[in-house]
């Protein structure tokens, strides 16, 4: 099953990462109704999770290329640019430096998780050899 999943994702991961990126940009710039769930700073957790997923997806795409720093910087820059665009292009969204911090934290957590998972995968491959 794992082998089947790997072969399916191999060619599709780039499209998945692009789709995640475009979805994130669109959702960040469109008007979304306010929701009240009673969870403090829920939107910051959502930002953190979204950028965690974004970074994991791009790190997976370029896993063999070893461009982790470039991917992390690009993901953080995307978060900053989106916050600026929210201020400049929309009247219903505002850019917030707290969102930039949450976005960046999500990217860094994604890198940390990816490094932990990647290290375990590398160790397992060496044992199999």
Image (cartoon, rainbow, N blue to C red):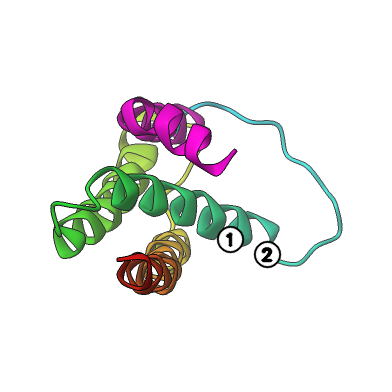
Q: Quadrant of the C terminus?
A: bottom left
Is 55 located above or below residue 27 in the figure? Answer: below
Q: Residues within 10 Å of mark 1 (few under 14, many from 20)?
A: some
Q: Which range of residues does the magenta coloring cover?
A: 1-28
Magenta region, mostly helix, strand or loop?
helix
Give the number of marks: 2
Report the residue at 44% width, 57% height from top. 96
Task: Check if residue 23 falls in the magenta segment.
Answer: yes
Residue 52 at x, y percent in the picture: 47, 57
Report the residue at 51% width, 31% height from top. 27
Q: Nearer the viewer, residue 89 or 17?
A: 17
Residue that numbered label 1 is attached to: 44
Is 67 located above or below residue 36 in the figure? Answer: below
Labels 2 and 1 touching (C-beta < 8 A): yes
Name the disc covering residue 41, or none: 2
Q: Quadrant of the N terminus?
A: top right
């Amino acid at each position: 099953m794992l082998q089947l999943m790997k072969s399916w994702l191999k060619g599709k991961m780039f499209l998945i990462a692009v789709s995640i990126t475009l979805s994130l940009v669109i959702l960040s710039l469109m008007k979304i109704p306010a929701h009240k769930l009673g969870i403090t700073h829920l939107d910051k957790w959502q930002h953190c999770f979204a950028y965690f997923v974004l970074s994991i997806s791009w790190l997976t795409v370029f896993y063999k290329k070893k461009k982790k720093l470039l991917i992390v910087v690009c993901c953080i820059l995307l978060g900053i640019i989106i916050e600026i665009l929210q201020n400049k292009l929309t009247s219903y969204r505002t850019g917030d430096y707290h969102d930039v911090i949450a976005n960046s934290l999500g990217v860094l957590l994604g890198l940390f998780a990816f490094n932990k998972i990647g290290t375990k995968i590398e160790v397992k491959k060496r044992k199999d050899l």
